[in-house]
Image: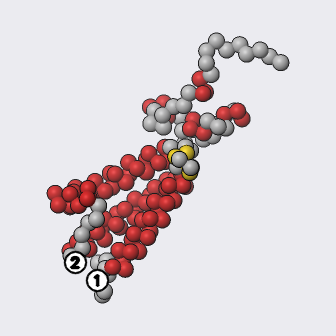
Amino acid sequence: MQQERRQYADRRKKTLSPFSLVRLHGKRRKPVRSDDADISGQIDWYHSKYLLLSMLILVLCGMDSHNTLALLQFGGRELNPFMDVLIRIDVTLFVLGKFALTGLGMIILVAYHHRRFLFFKVRYSLYVILAIYIVLICYQILIFPAGINILFP
């Protein structure tokens, strides 16, 4: 059996931030060595399903903002206090803020998809957010005044 000849600590034990500049040019799709399997945070490319999930969530976010603005015209109100402030200031600011916050959240969740938070993997939160948005859009369609089509005005 060979004796360990390293002078320094194993550099593979140190994890890079998902937002590191080193990752902009990387091409690692999976851990290189078999003993690196537990260091799944060291990849540079993410599975395309995370892009698809993020895009679906952003499309539903756009539908939510459209439906919210349409419902406000018929006497509805925004329940999110932060978004309510943005709507009162400017509708464009509301839409941009909604997309910016959702987009930033998607970037962070995809970047840390391999981690655990409390008792579940972060990647599952993408599916939960997608399901919540689907339920929200269905709810908005159900409460809309009868006879008015909000999907295709």
> Sequence order check: which comes first, mark 1 or mark 2?
2
* Residue 50 in view, yes or no: yes
Amino acid marked by disc 1: Pro
For image coordinates 40% across by 59% down, the residue present is: 58
* Residue 90 in view, yes or no: no
For image coordinates 56% across by 27% down, the residue present is: 14
Q: Secondary structure at mark 1?
A: loop
The answer to which image quadrant residue 129 occupies is: bottom left
Image height of 129 relative to 105, above or below: below
Report the side of 28 relative to 22 (left or right).
right
Report the side of 87 relative to 23 (left or right).
left
For image coordinates 20% across by 57% down, the residue present is: 85
The answer to which image quadrant residue 63 occupies is: bottom left
Q: CA distance from mark 1 to mark 2?
A: 8 Å
Amino acid marked by disc 2: Phe
Image position, residue 130 (x, y; %):
47, 62
Instruction: Read off the residue under disc 1.
Output: 145
Image height of 140 relative to 92, above or below: below
Q: Secondary structure at mark 2?
A: loop
Quadrant of the image containing the N terminus: top right
Query: Callout 2 environment at 10 Å: few (<14), some (14 to 19), or many (20+)?
Result: few
In contact (CB < 8 Å): disc 1 and disc 2: yes
Image position, residue 46 (x, y; %):
54, 46
Instruction: Read off the residue under disc 2.
Output: 74
Q: How many marks?
A: 2
